[in-house]
Amino acid sequence: MSSRRAAITTVAATVAVTVTAGLCLPGIADAHRAPVVTRAGLDPGLVAGRGAHVDFAEQEAENAVSTGTVIGPDRTAYTLPAEASGRTAVRLLAGQHVEFTLPGPTNAITVRYSIPDAPGGGGITAPLAVTVNGRDRRTMTLTSRYAWLYNQYPFSNDPNADLLHPDWWITECSCVPEATTPRPVIPKPFRPSHFYDEQRLLLDRTYRAGDRLRLSVPAGSPAAWTVIDLLDSQLVGRPQVNLRAANLLLFGADPTGRRDSAPAFDRAIAFARRHRVPVYVPPGTFQVNRHIIVDDVTIEGAGSWYTIIKGREVALDPPAPDGSVHTGVGFYGRPAAAGGSRNVHLSGFAIEGDVRERIDLDQVNGIGGALTDSTVRGLHIRHTKVGLWLDGPMSNLRVTDNVIVDQIADALNFHTGVTNSVVSNNFIRNTGDDGLAMWSEHIPNAGNTFDHNTVQSPVLANGIALYGGTGNTVSANLVADPVREGSGLHLGSRFGAEPFAGSAWITANTTVRAGGWELNWNLGLGAIWIYALDRSIDADLQLVGNHFLDNTYNAIMLVSEWAVRDLYTITNVHVADTRVDGTGTSVLSARTAGAATFSNVDARNVGAVAVNNCGSFHFPATGSEFALTDHGDNDGWLAPWHLPNTITCDDRPPVTPPPPPTPWP
């Protein structure tokens, strides 16, 4: 064993001890198992009508035939199972495999996986063999270069780094390290996370339903282990062609990716604007290492499996006027301050960035700027900082049918004065911050809708978050497996956002295994949590028709920051037509002054006190500072003696893991 291989093994073992060992499945390599197709790790019937309609079938590795070891279930932050879909995966050693039975005709696959980091950070590469029915061997090259973050915000790629903020309080010692004598020894690597990445592979032909696709770790792999989380399989159509468009190749683009094609994009866009035709980007890999500025133009690819626009992250010296110290591939509208861009239509291609660290000032997003009266459709975006970060004011943007994965921060953020825009039918997985967010900094976001999107495994923060705004809607989304410092759905008066005003509608969403851990509070959150930090929240909040399944802690939480609990309240919250199937702790946790009404809210499999009413923690003789109103038909949790404001406070209730969700009778 080389010293490099030994070092990798050591780093891997350091992290692997946090993984719950599971069932080993030897001796069944030749067994045939019917395919188990899931959505967010569940029977699709449990989440019907919620989330994105996608053209691939999800199969969890733990449901397949394997000679490896099942890890999990475990929802503990900083462990491999916690970041896996369904909180369970399969760990393979060299010579081991996992085999999936294809559920339908398939010519393309996506594998979500994790392999160890290099000893000093920066990642490694390792092979993964792909065979179908024991033949047609292909090799995927896996990498951990875009995974493995450590330490405190804004995180580090160095597993051996000291604390980035020794003057911050941390839960690991319940102390401020630099102010503590003797100074505590903090184990390294400190808070490893963001373990997973995914690879796509277009197969050489179409295979039939029932064929067996095997993923095997070759002997001698440099990776001490390979964790397979899931396989997505699909039938990809032929490349799209537009003969009436300006073909990018005619302007000097290189489809092999060896030469920079950014100047060709500029020339093609200028031509297309003059002649009022689209730009067509044919199949190929096109190298672009900077922003492509778009305004009043349509850019069409041959499909996101065929047209790949890929770039390197480039250091800027000196930094850009906006503070960026790097640039990279991205399609950007003009800044709102310069009038923004209009009539931009982007579709049918992939954007692959090269972002491996979080630098918040860097403009290294897949899509950026201000885009009014525009559309973004059918893109595949990965390895950028944020898939789409839109800075308003701007209006009437439609973001539909995209896949956004493996982001350092958000998948999409409507920032500052975005209005009358729709984000619909997008699939999002493995973000390093909120999956979808509306942040009303300086100017309210208004009249926007997040509808029928799927958000899975946000490593940090929330699946979907609203920070202030007016008349926004979050509807029919599916959110699963948030890990820490956030949860499934969130409304927060924080980050300097403008107030919530008018109404916010949170309707017909489903969360799965949500209710994450708030590290700074050492406290479990709700699948939906409403948080007053900067000001009170008194807008009309309508939480209607939502399903909260298999909640790690609470289903619903309302909380004010401790330091302002006597200043700010949360009122005018209305919860109706809601199902709660399983809570580790409570159906409702109230840690604020305020009020809410409840109508036709049904709960079962409640792990602790159903209503955990702490109010603002003064415990007056008159009852809690938070009042509940029963509008009827609330079954399985709300009793007359809870009303209107009985103190039932258990600051840290014991957690009882709920059983898996089942169909509601």
Image (cartoon, rainbow, N blue to C red):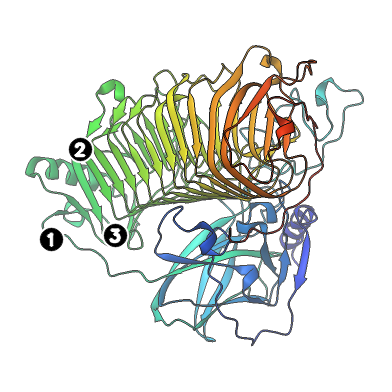
Closer to the eye: label 1 or 3? 1
Q: Around disc 1, counting alpha carbons within 10 Å, would you say few (fewer than 14), some (14 to 19), or many (20 or more)? A: few
Please tell me which residue lies in front, 22 or 6. Answer: 22
Disc 1 residue type? Answer: Leu
Relative to 34, say whether 606 is above or below. above
Q: Secondary structure at mark 1?
A: loop
* Dot 2 alpha-carbon crowd within 10 angstroms: few under 14, some 14 to 19, many 20 or more: some
Upstream in sequence: badge 1 or badge 3: 1
Q: Which residue is mark 2?
A: 343
Q: Are marks 1 and 3 in contact (CB under 8 Å)?
A: no
Q: Position of residue 454 (x, y in %)?
A: 47, 51
Which residue is at 46% across, 47% downward?
Answer: 477
Q: Is residue 451 left or right of residue 41?
A: left
Quarter location, residue 127: bottom right
**627 or 16, which is in the foreground?**
627
- Res. 250 visible in picture: yes
Classed neighbour count for the residue bearing mark 3: other residues with Cα under 10 Å, few (<14), some (14–19), many (≥20): many
Residue type highlighted by circle 2: Asn
Measured in 3D between alpha carbons, the distance from the residue under mark 2 to the one under mark 1, in whole angstroms, is 21 Å
Q: Nearer the viewer, mark 2 or mark 1?
A: 2
Quick one: label 3 or label 2, which is nearer the N terminus? 3
- Determine which residue is flagged by label 3: 255
What distance separates the C-alpha of mark 3 from that of mark 2?
A: 27 Å
Query: N-terminal of the two: label 2 or label 1?
Result: 1
Query: Is residue 626 depicted above or below 157 in this figure?
Result: above
User: Could you say which disc has been placed on residue 243 in the image?
Assistant: 1
